[in-house]
Image (tube, grey):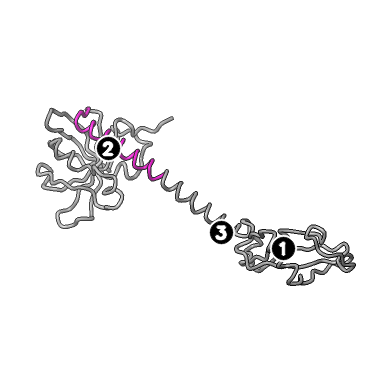
Amino acid sequence: MIVFGHNNFKIKTFTPRELNLPPDDSLKGAEIQIRQRYAHIFWIPFFPIGKIWGIKYEGSKDLYELPDDIKLKIKQRHSIKTPWYSFSLLILIFIGVSWFMASEAIREAKWESDYYLELAENKMQIKYPTTGDFYSFNIHDEDDDYGYTPVILKVKSYDDNSIEFVAGYEDLLAQERYEHNINDEMTNAYNYIYSPFKIKKEDLLKMLNTEYSKYSFTSAANKVEVPEFYNRKFSFNKIERQKLEKEE
């Protein structure tokens, strides 16, 4: 339930003497108050809704309306400003939104930085692979741009222009089955062992999204047709270098 309403607080007080008012027995011991009225939500000031100009006589708890001539004299001699904390809730909302936007900007900058670091690492591993590398791909069906089968291919050999792969493992990375040694996976029911085939390094590099903005706003990865693999189209996920064993 949202609690809202209005209230007021004291922002300035004067004595008749401070305002150089003529001697008047009725003003003896009186206190002239200027109070700020405000709307609140959950008792936190939201925005100001005017001021109360009043006078409290000695021995009275009530606040009476201040005569216009005294009010005019105060306005001529003093600047009565609306306190900033009359907007406390708006300020808190602004701070919260600003903090959130700054946090998102920092997080986005970190994601972009991490993306380009990973991209550079992937390029290096494609150009200079090792036989301990496992490449994760999506194999796309010919008539379906969005349907795919995740596989892992193991590097068998390589030269300056291409990489030869020896085996495929269906959806091993996607299932996060890190408790298994990948070499043991070659004997279980999730295996799909293929005849060795080669993919050109330049084709592998074409699969990489080189721009972070394209990666962020485009759901489909770059796809390259691999004739050696039944003319299927591949898209790149990532490269693992002997990292699939469970860490103790």
Label of residue 119 in the image: 2
Q: Mark 3 points at which residue?
A: 90
Label of residue 74 in the image: 1
Residues rendered magenta in the picture: 107-130
**Which quarter of the image is occupied by the C terminus?**
top left
Q: Nearer the viewer, mark 3 or mark 2?
A: 3
Secondary structure type for disc 2? helix
Decide: is 17 above or below 5.
Answer: above
- Alpha-carbon distance for marks 3 and 2? 43 Å
Q: Where does residue 15 sit, x and y in percent of width and height?
A: 81, 59
Q: Nearer the viewer, residue 151 or 106?
A: 106
Residue lying farthest to the left in this orientation? 227
Q: Where does residue 58 sit, x and y in percent of width and height?
A: 88, 64
Q: What residue type is labelled 3?
A: Leu
Name the quadrant containing residue 122.
top left
Name the quadrant containing residue 169.
top left
